[in-house]
Image (tube, rainbow, N blue to C red):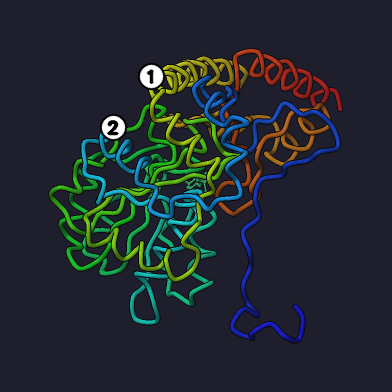
Amino acid sequence: MSRFMSPRFAGLEAYTPGEQPRDQQYVKLNTNESPYPPSTEVLERVSKAEVELLNLYPDPTGKVLKEKLAALYGVEAKNVFLSNGSDDILNFAFMAFCDAERGAAFPEISYGFYPVYGDLYHVDCKKIPLKEDFGVDYLDYCGIGRMVVIANPNAPTGMEISLAEIEEILKTNPDNIVVIDEAYVDFGGTSCVDFIKKYDNLLVVQTFSKSRSMAGARLGFAIANEAIIEDLEKIKYSTNPYNINRLTLAAGEAAVDSNAYYVETAKKIAQTREMTTSKLREMGFTVLDSVANFIFAKSNALSGKVIYEELKKKGVLVRYFGKAKIEDFVRITIGTPEQMNVLFEKLAEILQEQKGA
Ligand SMILES: *Cc1c(COP(=O)(O)O)cnc(C)c1O
């Protein structure tokens, strides 16, 4: 920290993204990206003609993309907010809806960015332990009187809570925002978007990074009651009105136009997940039941750290958190069936080598 930085950031611990090494080609199963490319519509739309327009600012309202998303989700354009990745929306939510008096609550084991935003804005955050089976206990959040943030399905477990449970959380927190982060919902989860018509305290967050194969484009969106969207717009227009670049907007429009392609790839990924889960269980792993594009797995023979390190040596990257309660686990992103076969092969080698060691 330089001597110029405000002391209010002295204790801030920034988020650590999953590694993106460039030293060699890895089978990359560590940051929950899609193994499939964007649709051909996206490839065609981000054209030379679009690049030639980069001298002009993009549409700060994102009108066309909002209308397309609204049609897809059965809401109105005024219920849609667009952002530079969904991380931006989470940032705005903590900035807009929390302060010294207004705290937040989220699962102790969840997306690692929530506590960072909490610290950034000096918000009192209640980190609620998961149940024995790694599920979120919705009762912990009923009437909690703070902003609730739940990833559903949760990361890194891949497990979800039901719509009925979300509804209870919404009903019992009428004076607090309930943020449901649906980054992984398209791989087999159930979206609560329809509840925005009934509950004015619901903020649903989604992203183009996972199921829409656009992590590199940085595009997220939120769906909520009009008043919440207006709050988020106020923050956006007070920080960076052009937060989504022209190429990303174009890519996003084309991606929504080709939604069927993404439904298809999400289905393929879900099938590969089921295959991977069975295979790893046969190999002696405990694997949580996931509805996301990753699985959370623990070997009955080796520590999570050894699995992570040995796989990396063999050119396969997975995510290891090394955190209390989950130190035996690794999170494995679901890739193509071919990539998963490489994973099985390397894991079998590692189990063999370590047995001999
Ligand atoms: C990946 C992820 C996000 C953020 O993704 P963006 O790339 O910023 O859209 C948000 N929440 C969860 C739980 C995630 O895993």
Tag 2 and tag 1, C-beta contact below 8 Å = no
214 versus 15 height, above or below: above
Give SS at disc 1.
helix
> Is 136 on the left or on the right of 171, as rendered?
right
Q: Amino acid at mark 2?
A: Leu
Tell me the residue at 73%/15% (across/down).
Answer: 345
* Most foreground residue, 39 or 132: 39
Task: State the residue lying farthest toward the left.
Answer: 198
Q: Position of residue 334 (x, y in %)?
A: 56, 25
* Most foreground residue, 187 or 135: 187
Q: Position of residue 353 (x, y in %)?
A: 83, 23
Q: Position of residue 247 (x, y in %)?
A: 55, 40
Q: Amino acid at mark 1?
A: Ala
> Is 267 on the left or on the right of 6, as rendered?
left
Q: Residues within 10 Å of mark 2 (few under 14, many from 20)?
A: few
Tell me the residue at 74%/28% (across/down).
Answer: 316
User: Can residue 246 be seen here?
Assistant: yes
Tell me the residue at 66%/45% (across/down).
Answer: 18
- The quarter of the picture where residue 147 lies is bottom left
Give the number of the disc on residue 260: 1
Give the quarter of the figure containing the N terminus.
bottom right
276 versus 100 height, above or below: above
Tell me the residue at 76%/86% (across/down).
Answer: 3
Q: Which residue is mark 2?
A: 72
* Sooner in the amino-acid sequence: mark 2 or mark 1: 2
- The quarter of the picture where residue 96 lies is bottom left
Q: Residues within 10 Å of mark 1 (few under 14, many from 20)?
A: few
